[in-house]
Image (tube, helix red, strand yellow):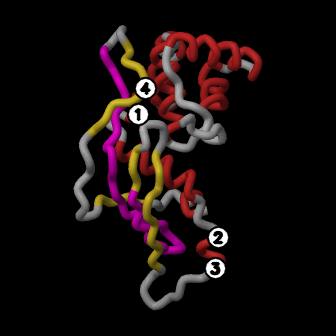
Amino acid sequence: MITDNKQVSIERTGVEDGKLVVFGPLDPSNGVQLSIPERFEREVTSGPRGLTLRVSCSFTGEWIDVSSLSVTPPKGEGLTSRALVQIALPPIVRELAASVIPRHEYWTAEFQDALGWGSLKTNDAFLAQLYWLEHVSQGSPRQTLMRYLAMPRSTCNVLIRRLRSEFPLPRPRTEPKSA
């Protein structure tokens, strides 16, 4: 996979980002809300393989949609089918989300670990935002909540049902869009 290597760089292209749009609930305790450009384009380059991906994305209101992808091999090399098969888009989209969502680190486990267990954010608005962030960036919202709160799946399912009753959460990607 292209993102297995720690030598991945993400660069802006000449295409201007769209306006920031908010998503997920507002946390009334601190006024924090997630936002993302409505459209953006970035160049992603991997270290040893040297592939350069130009990725154009748009935010659908529920997740990041890759609308265009071009792949350029390193100079002097051709583009092989093996290299194309090894490109894993979900981890790339996650990296892109981290680069375009303002204050993305606020919702990461690493940021929470730095605060220490006593400071772990667990209000429902924050947990709903965390769910949204994972969903939007093609992550695993349930798994992230389970890991973050160190809880089993059954308890997490109860939590998600509670969050759904309090905040609008995105529909699963496998569920068809209602007409």
Q: Which residues are magenta?
A: 31-56
Is 36 situated above or below 116?
Answer: below
Tags 1 and 2 touching, CB below 8 Å: no
Tags 3 and 2 touching, CB below 8 Å: yes
Looking at the rendered structure, the kind of residue marked 2 is Val
Question: Left of 61 or right of it: where is 109?
Answer: right
Is 178 situated above or below 167?
Answer: below
Q: Secondary structure at mark 1?
A: helix
Looking at the rendered structure, the kind of residue marked 3 is Ser
Q: Secondary structure at mark 3?
A: helix
Residue at which label 3 appears: 81
Using the rendered view, name the quadrant where residue 32 is placed.
Answer: top left
Residue at which label 1 appears: 105
Q: Earlier in the sequence, mark 4 or mark 1?
A: 4
Mark 4 and mark 1: Cα distance apart in space: 16 Å
Q: Is residue 50 magenta?
A: yes
Mark 4 and mark 3: Cα distance apart in space: 39 Å
Q: Secondary structure at mark 4?
A: strand
Tags 4 and 3 touching, CB below 8 Å: no
Quarter in which the N terminus is drawn: bottom right
The percent coordinates of residue 78 (x first, y second) are: 53, 88
The percent coordinates of residue 136 (x first, y second) are: 49, 39
Mark 3 and mark 2: Cα distance apart in space: 6 Å
Residue at which label 2 appears: 85
Is 16 situated above or below 145?
Answer: below
Q: Secondary structure at mark 2?
A: helix
Q: Main secondary structure of the magenta part?
A: strand
Using the rendered view, name the quadrant where residue 143 is placed.
Answer: top right
Foreground mark, 1 or 2, reads 2
> In percent of the image, x 51 and y 57: which residue is there?
6
Q: Earlier in the sequence, mark 4 or mark 3?
A: 4
